[in-house]
Amino acid sequence: MIFLKTDDEIELLRESNLLVAKTLGMLAEHIKPGVSTKQLDDLAEEFIRDHGAIPTFKGFPNPYGSPFPSSICTSINENVVHGIPSSDVVLRDGDIISVDCGTLLNGFCGDSAYTFCVGEVSDEVKQLLKITKEALYLGIEQAVQGRRLGDLGYAIQNHCEQSGYGVVREFVGHGIGHKMHEDPQVPNYGKRGSGTMLKKGMCIAIEPMITMGNRQLIMERDGWTVRTRDRKFAAHFEHTVAVGTCKADILSSFSFIEKVLGDKAI
Ligand code: MG
Ligand code: MG
């Protein structure tokens, strides 16, 4: 069931998503060679709790195993999503790291993700990040009343496949509100004119997960980390948005990250 949000509820969602945006901006200052993903997780958890919120990912149930142990997901290089932070995983020059962050503040969820470069990254990999981020915004352009989820998915899929990239099917975006995952599911692929019609008041997380090679995935033994089968790199960018009458209202923001990255931003 899709819950439409009132204007007041959308403002509460915006506050939670603003905290996610600030958390990712804070992490952007620490993402460099030599830093472990556990250090990033500790920084994020402290920052989120200091702002009176709860990291929604921590303890998130897993039907196939143990709950998620950390406050952020850190997925490096061939890892697509749901990587578990660890003191054994240390960032190296040339890596990319997708950081996914979720908060619960005043009863509403925030959810946003960004793929960062660590030090100097190859032009080929930067292009993957650029196209994935562009695809996210093309999807967001479709998040207006009267369009359908198939229009949104098509916009993302078409842009990425034109570059020869793979579009992950097994994981998708989602409705968001009091719960992190609400209806509807928001695939990053689709047929124009098909699927659920979008309405003002719907709030959705749009999150293309794009692979440089084949889109086939492997689940690691930890029951969480998802990687590409061919071990080619993958990117993940996510915004939470409210569907608008003429234009989507983006509730999360990359502005804090981009302020830190300056002209190095993708
Ligand atoms: Mg997320
Ligand atoms: Mg999400």
Image (tube, rainbow, N blue to C red):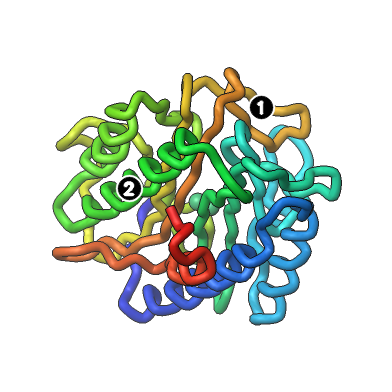
Which image quarter: residue 200? bottom left
Residue depicted at 29% across the width and 54% down the height: 140
Asked if 227 appears above or below 183 in the picture, the reply is above
- Mark 1 burial class by Cα count in 10 Å: few <14, some 14-19, many 20+: some
Looking at the image, which is closer to me, 185 or 226? 226
Return the residue at label 2.
134
Return the residue at label 1.
219
Residue 261 placed where, x, y %? 51, 64
Residue 185 visible from this viewpoint = no
Which residue ends up furthest to the right in the rendered image? 88
Residue depicted at 71% across the width and 44% down the height: 92
Residue 50 placed where, x, y %? 71, 80
Which image quarter: residue 229? top right
- Is 144 positioned to the left or the right of 35 in the image? left
Looking at the image, which is closer to me, 29 or 70? 29
Asked if 106 appears above or below 175 in the picture, the reply is below
Asked if 233 appears above or below 184 in the picture, the reply is above
Residue 111 badge:
none
Mark 2 vs 1, N-terminal side: 2
- Is 46 positioned to the left or the right of 206 in the image? right
SS for tag 2? Answer: helix
Give me the C-alpha separation between circle 2 and circle 1: 27 Å
- Mark 2 burial class by Cα count in 10 Å: few <14, some 14-19, many 20+: some
Residue 74 placed where, x, y %? 66, 48
